[in-house]
Amino acid sequence: VKLAAEVDTVQPSIIKSTEEIKNLQKKLGRESKGLEKAMKEVEAHDEKLTALGKEIEEYGKTDAQLQEEYEQQKRSSGSSEEDVTLTEEQEAEYEQIREAAAVASAKPRQALNVANTKMNNAQAKAATLL
C-alpha cells in the first residue's frame, strides 16, 4: 500500500515530465528547422557577396583600363608641348563654360552682324555716290 501511495504521488510528476520532454523535443525540432533555414540563407548571402565582389573587381579593372586608354589617347592627340592637359572634371567644366559663353554672346554677335551689314550697305552707297 505504501508503494502504491508513493507511485500515485510520483505518477503526476512523471506525466508532467514526459509532457515537458515531448514539448521540448517539438521545440528542438522547430528550432533545428529554423537553424537549417538560416544556414541556407547565410550560404546564399555568401554566394551573392562573392559574386558581387567579383563583379566589383571586374568593374575596377575595366575602369582602370578605360582610364589608361583615355590618358593614352589624350597624350597621343596632344603631342605638342604647348597643349594644355585637363582632367575629366576640368574638361567638363570647360565645356559648360564654353556653352554658357556661346549662349551669352549670341545677342551681341547678332547685333554686331546687323551693324556690319548696315556699315557695308552704307559703304556701298557711298562708293556709288563717289
Image: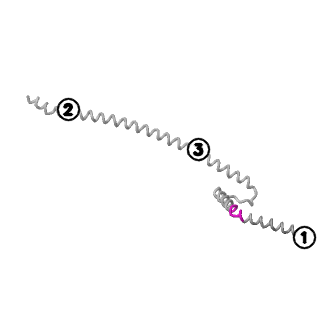
Which residue matches tag 2? 15
Between the C-alphas of marks 1 and 2, the distance is 133 Å
Mark number displayed over residue 33: none
Q: Residue at x 71, y 60 (%)?
A: 84
- Percent across and percent down for residue 118 are 80, 67
Which residue matches tag 3? 58
- Percent across and percent down for residue 52 are 53, 43
Q: Residue at x 22, y 34 (%)?
A: 17
Q: Amino acid at mark 3?
A: Glu
- Kindly report the secondary structure that dominates the magenta region of the rendered protein: helix
- Whether residue 30 sits left or right of residue 68 in the image: it is left
Q: Residue at x 59, y 46 (%)?
A: 59
Please give the range of residues in magenta: 101-107
- Badge nearest the viewer, 1 or 2: 1
Q: Secondary structure at mark 3?
A: helix
Q: Amino acid at mark 2?
A: Ile
- Percent across and percent down for residue 32 are 35, 35
Task: State which tag comes first along the sequence, 3 or 2.
Answer: 2
Between the C-alphas of marks 1 and 3, the distance is 78 Å
**Label 2 packing within 10 angstroms: few (<14), some (14-19), many (20+):** few
Callout 3 touching callout 2 (CB < 8 Å)? no
Mark number displayed over residue 129: 1
Q: Secondary structure at mark 1?
A: helix
Q: Is residue 2 above or below residue 81?
A: above
Task: State which tag comes first along the sequence, 1 or 2.
Answer: 2
Q: Going by the picture, which residue comes out furthest to the right? A: 130
